[in-house]
Amino acid sequence: MIWDTEHETMSREDMRALQLERLKWTVNYAYENVPFYRERLDGVGLKPGHIKTLNDIENIPFTTKDDLRKYYPFGLFAAPMSKIVRIHASSGTTGKPVVAGYTRNDMEMWTEMVARIVTMAGGREGGIAQGSFGYGLFTGGFGLHYGLERVGATVVPASSGNSEKQIMLLEDFGATALISPPSYALRLAEIAGEMGKSMDRFPLRVGLFGGEGHSMGMSQEIEKTLGITDTQNYGMTEVCGPGVSGECLEKNGMHLNEDHFYPEMIDPDTGDTMGYGEAGELVLTTLTKEGIPMLRFRTKDITVLDETPCPCGRTTVRMDRVHGRSDDMLIVSGVNVFPSQIEEVLMEMAGIGPHYEIVVYKKGYLDALEIRVELVDGSLLERFRELERLSKRIEHRLHTVLGIHTKVRLMEPKSLKRFEGKAKRVIDKRDDKSYKVE
Ligand code: ZN
């Protein structure tokens, strides 16, 4: 089933025409209502009337997360506060958060976009959805909530935390869909196990996962452990929250709501426009937002866009699972490494569980990596030769995929830190001169 057949199955030409019309509106609206955009556009001699084709967007300067922080809290709002009906903010761990404001129309669009994504993942009337994202300033909880209600699902707003209660609710209320970060789904399965329950016996059928990247390997691990279909969705506070794109059951990339967001691919180093089909940084321009219009926002997310037809019948462009954030990219011995690539390798190895940490430290002047990963069977720690063989096998596989040497440390089951929200996998010890790995 397709939620919004008109917009999700539009011909590419019609979509382009609609995007151009909306882009012209957005640029003019931002120019007229946000001094920041007026100064930026004047600075490069661009007037809204100069936007005549979609390619003209390339003349608009980029907007970054720093710009949003600089104009904290409401400096980039285009609508007066009297028209703003909702505020959300990113969970910025350092400094000021990124703030988003939504008008009544924005809320309606957001709900519709999420309804499309829920439908793509097979969500429908009669389904029961447990929302295990935090309800609060973070866009995750509320963001999905209204779209789930719109399609007619019964929403259980469990919010984040209190994992044992989450298990009880999943079992007693019989949720058919779980809404959470992917790593939290695995954490729930683990806790269910400790409670003597097996989640693959629950009525749960599908997971709508987002809020953090997850590799193909992680996705397969979730499907196997929970006995469900894993789908992913994508979004960020800066452009609205979840609902930018989501995966259909063909699972070949996330359909992007192109009538509301114009996507571009750029080279993250030079900012030059790249074609579809190549991995680059995703740049998004909002096409309908009134609260905070966003012109050419640099997401820092590395992905690939694909506009070849999808067997599901939708014609919207698909984005690949996020390969990594250009911010998270590690440079080890001159080689670019994304944590997601390491996850991919770990997930396909037998004998180790899905919980891992990546420690970046200094070895002389160079950055080096230590990978800590939990064993499935803790008794292996006493069988030194087998342990040695397994860690060498993982190191060898990582070397083949990444092209660098890493040190793998096999850990006792359940010895690494667990998270109730997004998992924090990378630990930076580069400033800790005393940190050494044997
Ligand atoms: Zn599809």
Image (cartoon, rainbow, N blue to C red):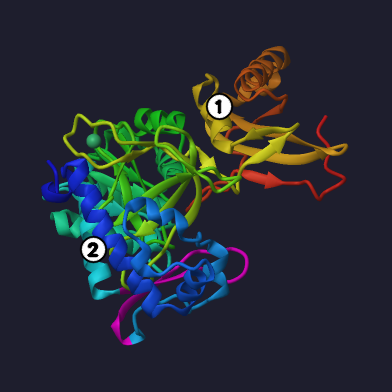
Between 16 and 50, the residue placed more toward the observer is 50
Q: Which residue is mark 2?
A: 109
Segment tinted magenta in the rendering: 82-102
- Asked whether, in this view, residue 110 is left or right of residue 346, the answer is left
Q: Residues within 10 Å of mark 1 (few under 14, many from 20)?
A: many
Residue 44: where, in percent of width, then height?
A: 52, 66
Q: Is residue 334 magenta?
A: no
- Asked whether, in this view, residue 401 is left or right of residue 245, the answer is right
Residue at 68% from the left image edge and 46% from the top image edge: 427
Q: Secondary structure at mark 1?
A: helix
Q: Amino acid at mark 1?
A: Leu
Counting residues from the start of the chain, the first of labels 2 and 1 encountered is 2
- Quarter of image, ligand 1: top left
Residues under numbered marks 2 and 1 in contact, where contact means CB atoms less than 8 Å apart: no
The correct choice, above or below, for 8 with respect to 413 in the image is below
Inter-mark Cα distance, 2 to 1: 39 Å
Residue 395: where, in percent of width, then height?
A: 67, 21
- Asked whether, in this view, residue 239 is left or right of residue 346, the answer is left
Give residue 246's mark: none
Residue at 70% from the left image edge and 40% from the top image edge: 359
Between 219 and 32, the residue placed more toward the observer is 32
The correct choice, above or below, for 395 with respect to 327 in the image is above
Ligand 1 contact, mark 2 (Cβ < 8 Å): no
Q: Which residue is mark 1?
A: 346
Which of label 2 and label 1 is nearer to you? 2
Residue 250: where, in percent of width, then height?
A: 25, 30
For this orientation, the residue located farthest to the bottom is: 82
Between 155 and 270, the residue placed more toward the observer is 270
